[in-house]
Image (cartoon, rainbow, N blue to C red):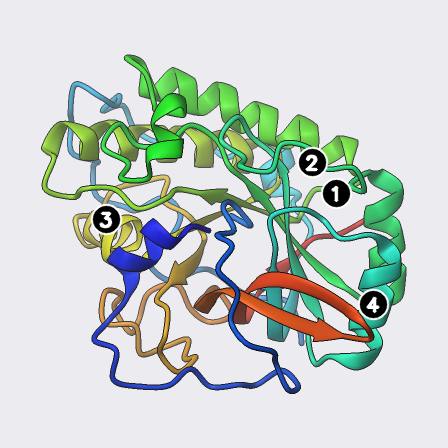
Amino acid sequence: MGFVLALLALPALLTVPAVAPRAAAATGAEAVTGAGPVTGAGPVTGAGPATASSPASPASPASPASPASAAEQSRPRPRLFRGWAFDTCTAPPLSTMSRWRKHSNYRAVGVYYAGRGRHCKRQPHLSRAWMRGAHRMGWRVLPTYVGSQPPCVTAKHKKTVRIGRHPWWQGRREGKDAVLKARMFGIRAGSPLYLDMEAYRLTDRRCRLKTLAFVRAWNREVRRHAYLPGFYSSANSGVRHMEMARSQGVRDLPEIMWFARWRTKPNLYREPQLSRHAWRPARRIHQYMGNHKERYGGRTLVVDRNLMHAPVARIG
């Protein structure tokens, strides 16, 4: 998810990343952008609609949250996974997925399935059949949507896909696109859809307002169709922003938090930018290492490493 994100997400480089999956190779130099998490979970603490009114702003409507749709009310209980996950820019061939399933400790994979902001737009292996094949092998899938990016996004290659003048309506439109594309790949209702927001400058107030309006509208649209809105970003930018909004009682926030803080030991509940009581239980993913070259079963990939306890896709 980009070396620029890493620069903002990193804490002081005092610890060596824990090597949980089996013996990994040396780190690679290639940057990977965009993926872009047991029993059923109960209500999400600190996520979803809040009881307090959302702060009004030029960038987002101040109207009350709409009643839950029939689809949302009948949403299946999420399927959860706890363990190790990797994400990589391009979905690997199923033959590689089979070898990694046999020879690594990874059991979940982040897949960049759609969005105008995807770095690897060409996905020669990704299809509905790929999703089903990976699922049959035992892989859990984290569907990641890389849509429009904050106006103050720091990555140069993301500046061409920034949020426009009407963030609320743009967020709704892209939320609908995320659902339609998910259905095309056989990702069923009750699945999480993770919105990937690369690092941005929190000191820019107008940018914050636009970004929050976009994220809230995207979340509301995804939730309206009985999917779970998740959120990926740097711990020190997007994740901090969502925590600030949560603490202010803002509605329509993500239900699952996927935070990037690299070169630190994997830990779901010690992230300093998140309240210990928010986004739990089973609602967090920690991306603790990025752009790492690993080889299992004779196949090499450049991946980001994650520890997760969160919902995964329902594939059908």
Residue holding disc 3: 241
Spatial CA distance of label 4 from label 3 is 35 Å
- In space, the residues marked 3 and 2 are separated at their CA atoms by 26 Å
Disc 3 + disc 2, Cβ < 8 Å: no
Q: Hey, which quadrant is residue 25 in on the image?
A: bottom right
| Earlier-in-chain disc, 2 versus 1 | 2
Residue type beneath disc 3 = His
Q: Disc 3 or 1, which lies upstream in sequence?
A: 1
The alpha-carbon separation of the residues under discs 1 and 4 comes to 17 Å
Q: Position of residue 41 (x, y in %)?
A: 57, 66
Identify the mark at residue 138; answer none if there is no mark.
4
Name the residue at 15% across, 27% down: 56
Front in this rendered view, residue 101 or 246: 101
Question: Between disc 2 and disc 4, whose residue precedes?
Answer: 4
- Nearest to the observer: residue 158 or residue 165: 158
Residue 123 rendering spot, x and y as whole percentages = 72, 37
Q: Is residue 51 left or right of residue 30?
A: left
Q: Nearer the viewer, mark 1 or mark 4?
A: 4
User: What residue would you read off at disc 1?
Assistant: 188
Q: Residue 301: x and y, percent?
A: 67, 62
Q: Which mark is residue 118?
A: none
Q: What SS does tag 4 mark?
A: loop
Mark 4 vs 3: CB contact within 8 A: no
Say what secondary structure mark 1 lies in. Answer: loop
Sequence-first disc among 3 and 2: 2
Estimate the spatial distance between the alpha carbons at disc 2 and disc 4, rounded to whole Å.
Answer: 19 Å
Q: Residue at 66% across / 86% down in the picture?
A: 22
